[in-house]
Image (cartoon, grey):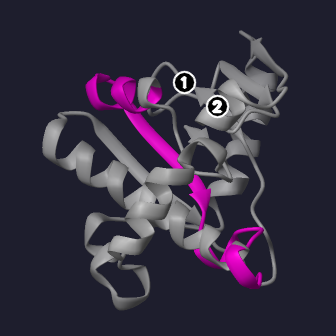
Amino acid sequence: RLATAYFNLTRALEDALACTPASVSLLTAAPSAHGWHGASGVASLIPRLYNHLEHRLLSRLQENSTSEVALSEYCRPAWEFHAKGLWFAQSKDSPPCLTVVGSSNYGYRSQNRDLEAQMCIITSSPKLQAQIGAESEALIKHSNQVTIKDFSLKERRSSVKDSFIAFVISTWL
């Protein structure tokens, strides 16, 4: 499972998702749980741009991938989503044995513009694995799975303007 509040994954990470044999669960902020939701001016476009990037990735994975990738959005009334992390389990039925915690959002900006710090924790302790798994599950508890069909809804459709702006400023998102 990979969680990021700002869904603007690097091309290398998108490529890895497209060819992984593993089952992958992505978690990000729903437009209403985004820190920029309700902003005024140009900032009001930011949730729409992340929405566009989600749609673009799901479309790409659906067309060119055999990977099993599920996308969910955190949506809890009056809450913002700012979680980030990576959790790895050896199978769907086992708890995570590895987690990556830190400040990276796994996007271009985190990788190339901002100063980020991360730490990888690997454990064989069943107790710690259960705690790490509970943390991950607590985030999913308030999320809804998103499919490609959801982006055909009027409030989720990307415009040509969204596509153009996302292309121009994607390295800053």
Q: Which mark is residue 86?
A: 2
Give the amino acid at mark 2: Leu
- Quarter assignment of residue 54: bottom left
Relative image position of residue 119 (x, y in whole percent): 81, 17
Question: Which is more toward the observer, 50 or 5?
Answer: 50
Q: Nearer the viewer, mark 2 or mark 1?
A: 2
Which corner quadrant of the image does residue 135 belong to? top right
According to the image, label 1 marks what residue?
89
Element type at marker 1? Answer: loop
Instruction: Reply above or below: 115 against 50.
Output: above
Q: Verify whether residue 21 appears in magenta.
A: yes
Whether residue 90 is visible, yes or no, is yes
Q: Residue at x 77, y 81 (%)?
A: 39
Residue closest to the eye, 29 or 144: 29
Query: In terms of secondary structure, where does tag 2 sit?
Result: strand
Image quadrant of residue 32?
bottom right
Query: Magenta stretch: residue 66 in it?
Result: no
Question: Badge 2, how many Cα within 10 Å: few under 14, some, many 20+?
Answer: some
State the image coordinates of residue 163 (x, y, percent, origin top left): 39, 63
Q: Which residue is drawn at the image coordinates 36% and 60% (left, top)?
A: 55
Q: Could you give the CA–CA distance between mark 2 and mark 1, rounded to whole angstroms?
A: 10 Å
Judging depth in this view, the residue of 157 and 66 nearest the camera is 157
Judged left or right of residue 88, residue 92 is left
Q: Is residue 106 visible?
A: no
Is 70 positioned to the left or the right of 51 in the image? left
Residue range of the region highlighted in magenta in the rendering: 13-42
Which amino acid is tagged 1? Answer: Ala
Q: Residue at x 80, y 24 (%)?
A: 127
Picture layout, residue 139 above or below residue 74: above
